[in-house]
Amino acid sequence: DEAVAPENLGVGAPSVLPDNPLYVFKGIARGVQSLVTFAPEKKAELKLRFANEKIVEAQVLADRGKSDRAARHLSSYEKDLASAQKFAEKVKDTKPELITQIITSGFEHQAVLDKVERIATGDAATLVRDVRVKTIVHIAEAVSNVSDGAKIAEALSASVSSDTSPYKPLR
């Protein structure tokens, strides 16, 4: 079971997780950051960072045997990824690298979704499958916004070629 390294997603290891009562303050801080961020490109970057942080948080929860809690947390992750994709689409002509980042991150996220789905049970497993489908749709929408096919290949190659990639065996 290869884990997704937080640094592959440009985030650090989480210090407060969703099962901690203090996590509510992290959510408030994220909400304030979203409210005071206006430019679509900055909003896309911010929402992608939130999605990356949340997928790592879900991974840590799953690693600690809290797969059902991780599964519930993935709904919030998916909303941020959808938002990042929506804002990136608005600036695809001036900041095409945002679309590429969403594709690369989304590919990395699949390893965590797979891991949580395998260990979750009942409704939680169904929730993870639903999130996985929505995530794949977001990635596909991002791919459809890339006019240069080489950029897509580059994004997927970057996901596989990293030494800390969960897809290292595919090389």
Image: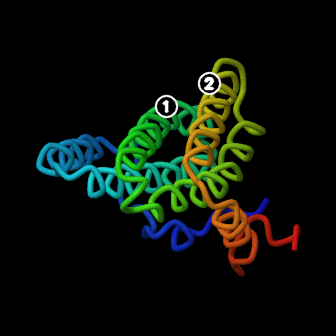
Tag 2 or tag 1, which sits nearer the N-term? Answer: 1
Neighbor class of circle 2 (other Cα within 10 Å; few <14, some 14-19, many 20+) is some
Left or right: 42, with 170 as reference point:
left
Q: Amino acid at mark 2?
A: Leu
Left or right: 127, with 111 as reference point:
left
The residue singled out by tag 1 in the image is 75
Q: Amino acid at mark 1?
A: Ser
Pinpoint residue 126: horizontal percent, then vertical percent: 68, 22
Left or right: 81, with 47 as reference point:
right
Residue drawn at point x = 16 percent, y = 49 percent: 38
Point out which mark residue 127 bears.
Answer: 2
Q: Quadrant of the C terminus?
A: bottom right
- Tell me whether the residue at label 1 lies in contact with that at label 2, contact meaning CB atoms closer than 8 angstroms: yes
Q: Quadrant of the N terminus?
A: bottom right
Point out which mark residue 62 bears.
Answer: none
Quarter where residue 27 is shown: top left
**In the figure, 37 relative to 70: above or below?**
below
Left or right: 27, with 104 as reference point:
left
Q: In this rendered view, identify the residue nearer to me: 113 or 47.
A: 47
Q: CA distance from mark 1 to mark 2?
A: 8 Å
